Amino acid sequence: MSEVGRSQAGSSTLTEAREMPEDVEELQRRLKRVRRRLKTVESELRSTTSELRRVRGRLSEARHDLPEDVERTIRQVTEEKLSFLGEHHLRNLATVVRDIEAAGIPGVLLETGTARGGSAIVIAAAKAAERPLKVYDVFDTIPPPGEQDGEDVHERYRTIAAGEARGLDGEVYYGYREDLHGEVRESFARLGCPVEEHAVDLVKGLFEDTVRPDGPVAFAHLDGDWYDSTMVCLERIVPRLSVGGRLVIDDYYNWSGCQRAVHDYFEGREGFELLQRAKLHVVRLAP
Ligand SMILES: C[S@@+](CC[C@H](N)C(=O)[O-])C[C@H]1O[C@@H](n2cnc3c(N)ncnc32)[C@H](O)[C@@H]1O
């Protein structure tokens, strides 16, 4: 068609459009239908994306392609009874840390609640040597629980306060040891991760006084058992969590107060995904 022909055809279509005005109400109804469809598609996309993340996560929990040195550290931590976490959970932690490294998520790594140091040593073995790891603990007897903790927690604390708690296989309970901080430091070195060569900082004190990250956080292992101990860490750490960064919350299925703190903190808070894995994971999806 020539330029003239095309412009004539175009102008006659325009004339028709002017002469036959569209039914505004019908267009508004169509717009509503399209918007409804879009919402359905968006919500399907969201649930498919989180299903994808869940399946990927389970696959990586099931697969555990860990290097031999990390496997060796996990075996040694288990043999020396340095952690309350079983081998499977320690492997999961190491895998999360390696995934954070592989994805290049910016920020420091944190552990809040370390006791004899087992899980922190595994995290140190799995991370890049230069990535800072801050390990927080009172390195003494655990502080008392509060009003928000349930009877399960108070009963446990009564046993601890009465001096009747036992460590793994009847060993001295970590909270009664003379120099837990020194012991943990030695354990890092004995298991091949001396703190000074692996950018590890063992910070002694109550979380309330010590946990104050001043830059991005790529990963945090929260293992402080009680409501207040969990809540203070969520309040201080989550605002610093990088997009793609992750929390692993150890006690969510074990202690009522921890579970309550997680619900209280994340209720109505957007931009996070809570994944019910072997432990509870929280992933930051958006800034
Ligand atoms: C279950 S243990 C940690 C276990 C360890 N991650 C492992 O691998 O076995 C909990 C630790 O958190 C510490 N903790 C709990 N609340 C705390 C608080 N508010 N401030 C400092 N340390 C705290 C306890 O003293 C204890 O050492």
Image: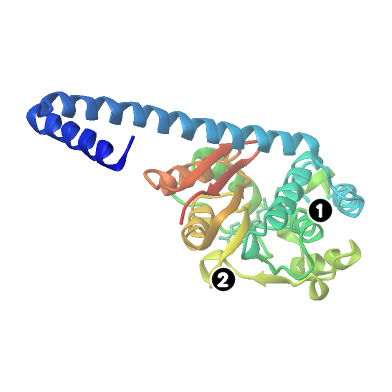
Kindly tell me whether mark 1's CB lies below 8 Å from ligand 1. Answer: yes
Residue 39 on image: x %, y %: 35, 31
Which picture quadrant has residue 21?
top left
Kindly tell me whether mark 2's CB lies below 8 Å from ligand 1. Answer: yes
Assign a secondary structure to mark 1: loop
Q: Is residue 162 left or right of residue 191?
A: left
Q: Is residue 149 left or right of residue 57?
A: left
**Could you tell me the amino acid type at mark 2?**
Thr
- Residue pointed to by mark 2: 210
Residue 122 on image: x %, y %: 79, 55
Distance CA(mark 1)–CA(mark 2): 23 Å
Scheme of image coloration: rainbow
Which picture quadrant has residue 181?
bottom right
Identify the residue at image location x=76%, y=50%: 94
Q: Quadrant of ligand 1?
A: bottom right
Residue 208 on image: x %, y %: 51, 66
Identify the residue at image location x=14%, y=31%: 17
Q: Is residue 281 left or right of residue 187?
A: left
Which is nearer the N-term, disc 1 or disc 2? 1
Assign a secondary structure to mark 2: helix
* Relative to 29, residue 213 above or below: below
- Dividing the image into 4 quarters, which one contains the N terminus? top left
Residue in the foreground of this view, choosing between 237 and 119: 237
- Residue pointed to by mark 1: 82
Near mark 1 (Cα within 10 A), the count class, few <14, some 14-19 or many ≥20, is many
Identify the residue at image location x=77%, y=69%: 179
**Could you tell me the amino acid type at mark 1?**
Leu
Identify the residue at image location x=41%, y=46%: 264
Residue 242 on image: x %, y %: 55, 59
